[in-house]
Amino acid sequence: MEDAPRWTRVTVEALFELPFNDLLHRAQTVHRLHFDANAVQLSTLLSIKTGGCPEDCAYCPQSARYRTGVENEPLLPLETVLAAARAAKRNGATRFCMGAAWRGPKQKDLEQVAQRVRAVKALGLETCATLGLLREGQAEELKAAGLDYYNHNLDTAPEFYGEIITTRTYGDRLDTLERVRRAGIKVCCGGIVGMGESRAQRAGLIAGLATLDPQPESVPINDLVQVKGTPLESAPKLDWSEFVRTIACARITMPRSTVRLSAGRAEMPEAVQALCFLAGANSIFYGDKLLTTGNPEAARDRALLEKLGIRPA
Ligand code: SAM
Ligand code: DTB
Ligand code: SF4
């Protein structure tokens, strides 16, 4: 985008510092330039390979290093995945996202995932996968199977990253994102807030996302789900207003991206979710479960959207 400003931590921090109403007004104005303000996209998640992950992401219930009660399970059979995808479609989701607790897929894993992607795509759903780091050639295989989106998050600001993950670097993540981009798969890339980072570091996350070139098509913003047994089980909870501000900053800095109000909705009051939509969020995870933790029940989400006059898309 030739006219896009180059966002930095400092310029994003200045957005965070605006009075709340000014920030929301600006975000809603930008939102209306590019999107229908009364439509929200629905993505359903399924953990196709749960637990036992060798990585040490401090937020994650699926790391084998923490005792969180999540068991290590094998890859779900094709039929199980298809049944979940059919149910997601029946309930109104338009995208089906498959997550695997791997550092990255081995060749045999990739073939099995490709088979599942093909089958889900054939149902007429958009497909998304999040499988960890990709090696050369793997993104092309996923693309050939019909993968529309690949989710791989920056997670946090480069300067806070080392406090959260030591087994893979921020640079490793950029390499995977580049492979996804080159293969012609749409990029879904966001992060988590509420991990004890400072506001400057939240601004650093948003600046990192906004300076990806091209910007990600989809930007999930997760509010940390504190899981007992993880190192972040008692991180200081982010105030709701700061979460809404983060959504607004994502919207302003990535005007054409779909911003997803992601993890953390199970405990988020409806009024705060409504403010997130006002701040420019236009996608949610829809379905009773995220990967291993809870999400609002689908019927409750339908009622919330109806109450707000928002069309599921
Ligand atoms: N293993 C793959 C990877 O890390 O790339 C894919 C699955 S991983 C669970 C996908 C994303 O989920 C993470 O990058 C992180 O942003 C998010 N996530 C994981 N645990 C979370 C939690 N407790 N709260 C909020 N977001 C979380
Ligand atoms: C993303 O950014 N959030 C989703 C999805 N990408 C894969 C995952 C949220 C996981 C929350 C914790 C859990 O349910 O295990
Ligand atoms: Fe593994 Fe992904 Fe969890 Fe990190 S976020 S521990 S890579 S499943």
Image (tube, helix red, strand yellow):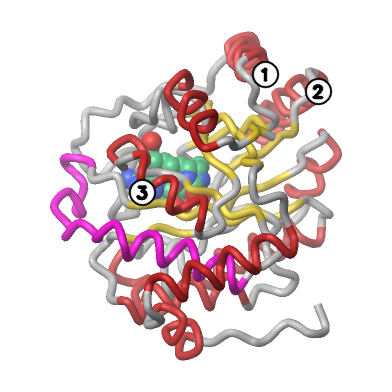
* Residue receiving disc 3: 272
Please tell me whether mark 3 sits on a helix, a strand or a loop: helix
Q: Position of residue 110 (x, y in %)?
A: 67, 35
Displayed quadrant of residue 280:
bottom right
Residue 191 lies, with reference to residue 277, above or below; the image says below
**Farthest left residue in view:** 234
Judged from the image, the secondary structure of the residue bearing numbered disc 1 is helix
Tell me where the magenta segment starts and ends, as one range: 227-253
Q: Are marks 2 and 1 in contact (CB under 8 Å)?
A: yes
**Above or below for 36 versus 75:** below
Residue 187 position within the rendered picture, expressed as x and y whole percent measured from the top left:
69, 55
Q: Mark 2 Cα within 10 Å, few/some/many (few <14, many 20+)?
A: few
Which of the marked residues, 2 or 3, is nearer the chain's N terminus? 2
Q: Please state which amino acid type lies under the numbered disc 3.
A: Val
Q: CA distance from mark 2 to mark 3?
A: 33 Å
Residue displayed at 52% across by 27% down: 46
Residue 74: say if magenta.
no
Residue at 17% from the left image edge and 40% from the top image edge = 228
Residue underneath mark 2: 124
